[in-house]
């Protein structure tokens, strides 16, 4: 069973980013989750290439970039060049999703599709076999520190069934409002990777919070 934790750097301290990067490096976390927001697809702007480059230069674990931007095709090469390993685009932001997924894979990255809370997992029927992972948004994208949407459990379970019925290797990543209380049921429902921002970085002991999430089940 593949259980990974991806701390979201959106909740890190940007005035002392190196400290939080080292914290993740020396923790039991598996990935760095990087939230890219354009102020159009989501009502917030986060950070862009210079910050991703700075994180990449210090990170000792793979980078998982979550693009909350319209027309992500424009920037796929940039993320590959910066050393991103896992790249997810939103289903709701891609008119030619199949082409986008093929492009991400041809650039040597793992390709993921992110779904907003209202988008049913069943809509993935004809793209699932092409993906390396699916990112289930368990809050409306745009901000850290929001509360978990309970319907996400049902989406994870239905997606897990679709993956198993077709004997695929697609991983399920869950993002938004993840904490040590809901992590056990998320893993039990079929999640493979949990993203956590606030519950890690607002904790008095972030490394311990990561360990607790990782061993939640
Ligand atoms: C939300 C982002 C998340 C966010 C998670 O739009 O995609 O990755 O940073 O933060 P928490 O864990 O605080 O909900
Ligand atoms: Zn995210």
Image (cartoon, rainbow, N blue to C red):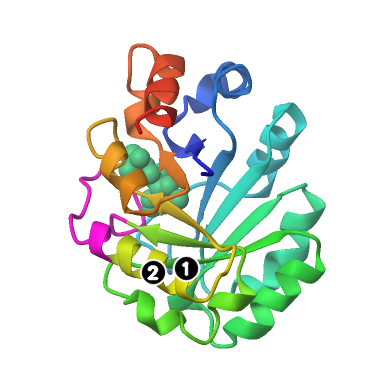
Instruction: Please state the extent of the stretch shown in magenta in the rendering.
Output: 138-154
Q: Do the residues labelled 2 and 1 touch (CB within 8 Å)?
A: yes
Q: Nearer the viewer, residue 3 or 176?
A: 3
At x 44%, y 24%, the residue is 210
Residue 36, percent from left and from top = 53, 53
Residue lying furthest top: 204
Instruction: Determine if the magenta segment contains residue 144.
Output: yes
Vertical placement of residue 72 versus 146, above or below? below
| Image coords of residue 55 (percent x, y) | 67, 34
Is 52 on the left-hand or right-hand side of 200?
A: right
Q: Mark 1 points at which residue?
A: 164
Q: What residue is shown with label 2?
A: 161
The overriding secondary structure of the stretch rendered in magenta is: loop
What percent of the width, then of the height, locates residue 85?
Answer: 71, 50
Rendered residue at 71%/49% (across/down): 84
**Dot 1 crowding, Cα within 10 Å, few <14, some 14–19, many 20+:** few
Tell whether circle 2 marks a residue whose Cβ is less than 8 angstroms from ligand 2: no
The answer to whether residue 139 is visible is yes
Residue 45 placement (x, y as % from top left): 45, 53
Q: Quadrant of the C terminus?
A: top left
Left-right relation of 208 to 29: left
Question: In terms of depth relative to the viewer, which is nearer, 35 or 38?
Answer: 35
Which quadrant would residue 204 be assigned to in this image?
top left
Residue located at (38% from left, 29% from top): 213
Res 47 label: none
């Amino acid at each position: 069973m593949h259980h990974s934790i991806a701390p979201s750097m959106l909740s890190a301290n940007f005035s002392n980013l190196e400290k939080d990067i080292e914290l993740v490096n020396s923790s039991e976390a598996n990935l760095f989750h990087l939230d890219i927001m354009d102020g159009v697809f989501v009502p917030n702007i986060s950070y862009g290439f210079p910050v991703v480059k700075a994180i990449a230069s210090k990170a000792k674990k793979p980078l998982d970039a979550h693009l909350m931007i319209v027309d992500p095709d424009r920037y796929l090469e940039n993320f590959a060049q910066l050393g991103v390993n896992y790249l997810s685009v939103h289903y709701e932001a891609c008119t030619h999703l199949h082409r986008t997924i093929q492009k991400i894979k041809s650039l040597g990255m793992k390709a993921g599709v992110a779904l907003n809370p209202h988008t049913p997992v069943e809509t993935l029927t004809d793209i699932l076999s092409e993906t390396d992972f699916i990112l289930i948004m368990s809050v409306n994208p745009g901000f850290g520190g929001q509360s978990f949407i309970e319907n996400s459990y049902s989406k994870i379970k239905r997606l897990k069934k679709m993956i198993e019925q077709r004997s695929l290797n697609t991983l399920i990543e869950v993002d938004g409002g993840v904490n040590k209380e809901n992590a056990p049921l998320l893993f039990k429902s079929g999640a493979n990777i949990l993203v956590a921002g606030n519950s890690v970085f607002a904790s008095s002991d972030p490394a311990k919070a990561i360990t607790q999430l990782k061993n939640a089940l």
